[in-house]
Image (cartoon, grey):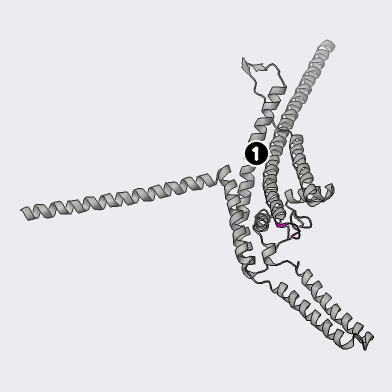
Amino acid sequence: MERQNTAYSSFHGSMRSRDSSSTTGSDAREKIKDCLRKFIAFMFTQVGVGALVVCYAMLGAASFIHIEKNSPDQQLEDVRQWRLNTTQQLWTIVQKNNIFDEAAFKTGADEILRVYQNNISQAIHKGYSGHSPEDIWSFPAALMYSLSVFTMIGYGNIVPKTVWGKILTIAYAFFGIPIYILYFCNMGKVLAKTFKWLYITAHECSRREDPMFEDGEPIKRKITVPSTACLWVISFYILSGTIMFGAWEKWNYLDSTYFCVISLCKIGFGDFVPGANIADSAGGSHVKLVINFVYVLLGMGLVAMCYNLMCEDVRFKVRELREDLKNCLDDITLKITVCMNDTKYYHQKANRQVK
């Protein structure tokens, strides 16, 4: 009996330990799932989407640097080899014909330089810029390239030349464009609510009117931000960018305005890009690219804000126009009805008088 009781108690103890361990494991899994749900919900908020866009751009910049910066540039090596061969061939002609046969020297030198010029022209047509991958793919430049990919601007001043770089660009754009659209929608809503609150507050402070009442209750007027205010905001932002980039890059105001507009409209021809001249000081060029990154990213949010506010203003005006047309039609119908009733009344009266 004692052995049976001991076995029975040990069996129940093992069962309780298994139940407690399974309960602990399920609790841990539930906590992990709850944390993941909270994290995903946070990433779809305004702050989370903004942080996601910045982190995605930084991750893309680091990836492109790792692939492109350390890969050999065959085009650069070909140009160096052409230059070396041209120098050697010219030196050979100088030794043979410089003194004894001036005509042969000129003919041979012209032919060698013509071949070299054709090779360099073809290389430039294929994208050769004379800079090494270490000079081109700095972190700010790669950051700006990542932004131009998933925002669909596509300046084109920096392009991947390796196979893996091109494959990564395809995948990066495939996943980055939906993230950017999410950022565009969320940031537009946040900025639109903030600007609308500021506009309504300023509107109420500037106009001290007595409230209108209907059935003993105050009438709440719906206030919308006019489209002209949105245009003023975008114009001021473009003006600030025009002055800033014009002072840095020594562009005239037309070129600076042209760059700001094509960047915010996501056209991005690439003929004007801040910090593209690598011959400048590296630090200044990098700072320009970082500020251009912030300017374009914030400008996209302002464009989304103005889009939301202008759509709301248009919907409100269309609703007012529809109500005005309905009231006008009701008035016209009422007048026609009254006129017909009056005509009928006078006609009946005239008939009675005749009888």
Horizontal arrangement in the rendering, residue 17 relative to residue 245 (left or right) = left
- The residue labelled by disc 1 is 191
Q: Residue 293, percent across and down?
A: 68, 50
* Left or right of residue 276: residue 67: left
Image-quadrant location for residue 268: bottom right
Q: Give how far across and how far down residue 175 sits, in percent.
A: 59, 57
Residue at point 30%, 49% (across, down): 23
Picture coordinates of residue 291, whole percent (x, y): 69, 49
Determine which quarter of the picture holds residue 306.
Answer: top right
Q: Is the magenta stretch mostly helix, strand or loop?
A: loop
Q: Quick check: can you spot residue 223?
A: no
Which residue of the protein is positioned furthest toward the left in this rendering?
Answer: 1
Q: Dot 1: few (<14), some (14–19), or many (≥20) neighbours within 10 Å?
A: some
**Residue 55: x percent and y percent?**
58, 52
> Foreground residue, 26 or 124?
124
The residues colored magenta run 277-282
Q: Is mark 1 on a helix, strand or loop?
A: helix
- Decide if residue 116 is on the left or right side of residue 107: left
Q: Nearer the viewer, residue 37 or 269?
A: 269
Which kind of residue does numbered mark 1 sit on? Answer: Leu
Horizontal side of residue 51 vs 78, given as left or right: left
